[in-house]
Amino acid sequence: MQVIKGDIEYFKNIPQIKFEGVESDNPFAFRWYDENKIITGKTLKEHLRYSCAYWHSFNGSGADPFGEPTHLFPWNESADPIERAKDKMDAAFEFITKMNLPFYCFHDVDVVDYTNDVANNEKRLLAIAEYAKLKQKDSGVKLLWGTANLFSNRRYMNGAATNPDFHVLAHAGAQVKAALDATIYLEGENYVFWGGREGYMSLLNTNMKREQEHFAKFLHASKDYARSNGFRGNFFIEPKPCEPSKHQYDYDAATVISFLRQYDLDKDFKLNLEVNHATLAGHTFQHELQVAADAGLLGSMDANRGDYQNGWDTDQFPNNLYELVEAMLVVMESSGLQGGGINFDAKIRRNSTDPEDLFHAHIGGMDAFARALIIADNILQKSDYKKIREDRYGSFDNGKGMEFEQEKLSLEDLRNYAIEKGEPQVISGRQEYLENIINRFI
Ligand code: XLS
Ligand code: NI
Ligand code: NI
């Protein structure tokens, strides 16, 4: 076997993170995430399928529109782009394995620097993919999904697949082809499209209908290419309403579902839902999960949280147990994620500058989701939560209500029933009672 680099230990003094239980006061241990714990016939590891987001953890520098980088990584020092990419991958795999994360995700440009030369980029991506393949084999870590960054390069300022200039669209095609090749080669389980600039800044210069048709054709071409090259996984669309576009076409789950159905893409594409994108769209995360689950398209999730005072995509690590329980109730009731996992699309703060901070962030997120799943399962097994909701619709389970569901009643029949039965009773929705159940099981 080829010698794998990685003799440098980047996260020195940080041990392998293990499960120690709630009694532990070790900040470098899991208190809830016992990967072997069985819930409804599956281990926590199988339910949660945690993944590290390469871009935030290994590319994000802490820079913001007002300030220079604060996260100064030792793996960024080599002058040679491939060497630098390998050093970064060494650091990433050291982190991922110390954290016991079973998966990772990346954009093409996260793993190696790109130039404006298509053929050179293909060569670079292939070189680093060969290295990643060895790393995966060596560690057992798998690729949850691959993707292409079609929003950072200046050529994409007016969009990629929805760009008014066909020449730019062709470049997006070249990039997706290479990213799909890398994903297939690395046995990636899914492939994501997040269209940050697939939208518009002003309708005055935009033919929205034509752009969306191009987007659909682009997705069909990508899917056909991947399928004919042996890719059997899911494609995911990741909705977001805006930022960086003023208006993004993949606004929210409902918008994406209707787009997928309109363009006959719903057999191959599912949804990857992100908490902070849901809240930007004016929804709760659980709303977005429920919309996707009801359509049979709940694929994967990007875990993070926004800030109640700031209205942008702050991508903080998740820690709000109450909200996570509500989310996990939806996931558990719809029998889990289809093909995806929980990807920590979250970043440590600009002023979190110790190597340890990245560990605390992931430990907190992994523990919070594991705990939320255990609580949600307890609520479903041990409380009357499910029954209360079922009973609420009891009037449709027999008699005229059932006939209505069976499409046997006309509008006149409804009128006659209303006259016969008189004024309906006032029936409580019992919201506060249900809210208390969540806190009781926390
Ligand atoms: C940005 C998105 C992005 C996708 C992958 O807001 O969350 O990180 O997950 O392109
Ligand atoms: Ni995001
Ligand atoms: Ni995301």
Image (cartoon, helix red, strand yellow):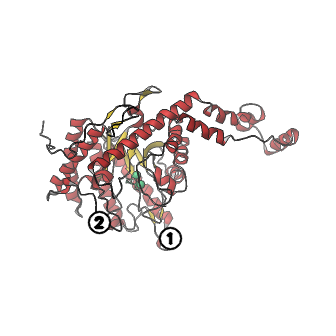
Local crowd size for mark 1, using a 10 Å CA cut-off: few (<14), some (14–19), many (≥20): few
Q: Position of residue 2 (x, y in %)?
A: 12, 39
The numbered disc on residue 232 is: none
Secondary-structure class at tag 2: loop
Q: Quadrant of residue 173?
A: bottom left
Q: Position of residue 258 (x, y in %)?
A: 54, 51
Q: In this orientation, which residue lies closer to the viewer: 321 or 408?
A: 321
Asked whether residue 268 is in view, the answer is: no
Callout 2 amino acid: Glu
Local crowd size for mark 2, using a 10 Å CA cut-off: few (<14), some (14–19), many (≥20): few
Tell whether 347 sits left or right of 178.
Answer: right
Tell whether 86 sits left or right of 425.
Answer: left
Indicate which label's residue lies in the foreground, 2 or 1: 2
Q: Position of residue 366 (x, y in %)?
A: 39, 40
Asked whether residue 162 is in view, the answer is: yes
> Residues at badges 2 and 1 in contact (C-beta under 8 Å)?
no
Q: In this orientation, which residue lies closer to the viewer: 279 or 419?
A: 279
Q: Which residue is mark 1?
A: 203
Examine the rendered structure and indicate whether residue 204 appears above or below residue 437.
below
Which residue is pictured at 22% across the width and 62% down the height? 117
Q: Which residue is mark 2?
A: 68
Secondary-structure class at tag 1: helix
Q: Position of residue 35 (x, y in %)?
A: 37, 31
Whether the residue under disc 1 has CB within 8 Å of ligand 1: no
Q: In this orientation, which residue lies closer to the viewer: 336 or 67?
A: 67
